[in-house]
Amino acid sequence: MSAKAPIAPEFDSERPVDPPMIGTETAAARPNTTAHAQQGADSEPRTERIDLDRYVVLTDSPIGYVEWVAPVFVCYVGHPYRNSEEIAQTHGFDEAVALVTERASRKSAL
């Protein structure tokens, strides 16, 4: 089997950028990325590396963690880490962050 294991992005700048699709706006017509990120900061989760293979998922405050245990990313909801609950395992980092965010929003809605 020659499948490559996923690689955890060390920094957000190492994540691949999606190329624009044909027929959509060009890169020049897109809004300023930093201004867009500041506007969506309340709804967009961000991640910070806190250990060699662990990331904290933040919105206003920490909502969960993503841990890279090759070849999967393990998703945890809750804070601090020792009190968090494992909710899923996935092969994609962005998918793991989305799962943590979704579960945390459902948990806070209860």
Image (cartoon, rainbow, N blue to C red):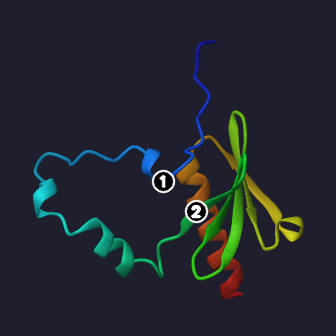
Lower sequence index among marks 1 and 2: 1
Quadrant of the image for the C terminus? bottom right
Question: Where is mark 2, residue-wise?
Answer: 47
**Could you tell me which residue is drawn at 53 percent across and 52 percent down?**
94
Residue at disc 2, secondary structure:
strand
Answer yes or no: do the residues labelled 1 and 2 have beta carbons within 8 Å? yes
Which mark is drawn over residue 100? none
**Quadrant in the picture for residue 63:** bottom right
Number of residue marks = 2
Q: Answer with left or right where residue 49 lies relative to residue 33.
A: right
Residue 28 x %, y %? 11, 58
Q: How far apart are the two marked residues, 1 and 2, measured between alpha carbons?
A: 8 Å
**What residue is at 58 percent from the left and 36 percent from the top?**
7
Q: Is residue 39 above or below residue 20?
A: below
Quadrant occupied by the N terminus: top right
In the image, what residue type sits under mark 2? Thr
Q: Is 33 on the left-hand or right-hand side of 3?
A: left
Residue 6, how many percent across, how many down? 59, 34
User: As rendered, which of 50 and 75 lies closer to the eye?
Assistant: 50
Q: Residue at x 60, y 69 (%)?
A: 101
Q: Is residue 77 visible?
A: yes
Residue 2 at x, y percent in the picture? 59, 13
Residue that carries the numbered disc 1 in the rendered image:
12
On the picture, is 3 further left or further right than 33? right
The residue positioned 37% from the left and 72% from the top of the image is 37
